[in-house]
Amino acid sequence: MKREDGKYAFASHFDPATGFYCRTGVLDENGHDTGVDPFMAEFPELLDIGVMGHCAHGLSGECARAGIQCYQSGATVHQDNMALDDFRWIVDQSRGRVFQFALGGRGDPELHSDFEEMLAYSRDNGIVPNLTTSGFLLDGKRAALIAKYCGAAAVSWYRTEHTLRAIDLLLQAGVRTNIHFLLGGDTVDEAIGLLQGDGLPQGVNRVVFLLFKPVGQGRQDNVLVPDDSRVATFFRLMDTDRGLRIAGFDSCSVPAIINHTSVIDRNAFDTCEGARFSAYITPDMKLLPCSFDQEMRWAFDLRAGGASIAEGWESPGFEDFRSRLRDACPHCAQRSLCMGGCPIRPEIVLCKNRHEYRACRESA
Ligand code: SF4
Ligand code: SF4
């Protein structure tokens, strides 16, 4: 699938069969690539959709017992799940513009009562759905639906017997299956062990490391800091043969990738794409630059009369979010690759040179 962005003069390509994605640099008037990365797209290419408003496992305390600090506050917040009509409204506006949906929210998306209809409607309209699950209640029937419609699935690494059973069910069904590993102060030693060769289930496509953020039930004391020597140890392992073969990371980790790796191709990743190439929609239809904006600082209400996703994308709140990426770290040589990292939680940015971090150290 190819998409040409008339407003920001670039083209992007997505292969629904493999998940391969690439985009050109900004094109000049003759269609030649200038080599300059486009800052944003005219409409999100990826939508993260919170179809789930509440989580049975969170309310039962199951996740907390597994040591999970839910950023969606699944243990205390109960919202209605997204209505099928709202989901269809999103698809209708995304047709021909969005390549992929990432289904999630406060709970496991395969437990939504309209799960199959949502998957089928996405596919019928040329959009590839993907999802993340804890796997607690995954069964063979739901795994088969995921195999039929989804590009890939990720199982959150909760280290329970459910985790291994869910991975097994998905692999047996033929799903490209990743592990989502939350990388924080309490797990970085285990992550180092995984990259050095311990304990990855057979058949898994990749283990994707997601940087911990102190959002929702996430505790501040679990945030990794740039001075922690384990941060350098971990990210340097990304440069090894095993790291390059089995690992992936979220764009929130890009400052650390820039500071600690040298082999990973700088053309192969992008920094925070919130409000630039992706956005999140809550179960009650708020458009956010990123799902971690749980305080709704940049929210645009899609239920306001006549509102559209395009209007939210162009809203002053989204423009304010972008300005933080545009203006961060003006003197850094890596600025165009990194843009200062996370606008929502600057304390997660793993860079000793970021101005907030330096100011904090200087005043200590
Ligand atoms: S100084 Fe800012 S832009 Fe440069 S690498 Fe650090 S966080 Fe990124
Ligand atoms: S806004 Fe922050 S949490 Fe969200 S994708 Fe960007 S860096 Fe990650």
Image (tube, rainbow, N blue to C red):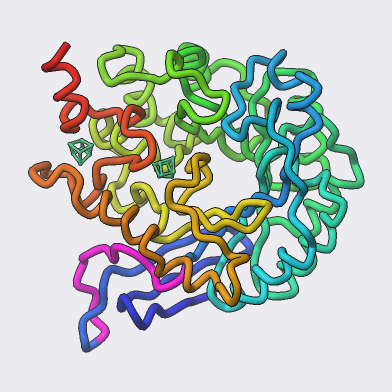
Which is more toward the observer, 88 or 163?
88
Residue 136 x/y as whole percent? 80, 29
How many dots with numbers?
A: 0
Please provide the residue range marked out in magenta.
31-43
Which quadrant of the structure image shows residue 347?
A: top left
Q: Residue 220: image x %, image y %?
A: 43, 18
Locate residue 87, reporting x and y percent.
72, 64
Residue at point 38% right, 75% down? 11
Q: Nearer the viewer, residue 19 or 215?
A: 215
Q: Is residue 342 visible?
A: yes
Using the rendered view, name the quadrant where residue 332 is placed: top left
Question: Residue at coordinates 46% horizontally, 20% vertically from top-left?
Answer: 184
Q: Quadrant of the N terminus?
A: bottom right
Kindly identify the residue that appears in the image at 91 percent across and 46 percent down: 141
Q: Position of residue 230 (x, y in %)?
A: 35, 13
Tell me: residue 58, above or below residue 111.
Answer: above
Residue 142 vs residue 66, the one in the foreground: 66
In the rendered view, tell whether residue 184 sits above or below residue 176: above
Q: Residue at x 47, y 61 (%)?
A: 21
Which image quarter holds the C terminus? top left
Farthest front residue in view: 305
- In the displayed structure image, the side of residue 33 where residue 222 appears, left or right: right
Residue 36 on the magenta span = yes
Residue extending farthest right: 141
- Magenta: main secondary structure equals loop
Quadrant for ligand 2? top left
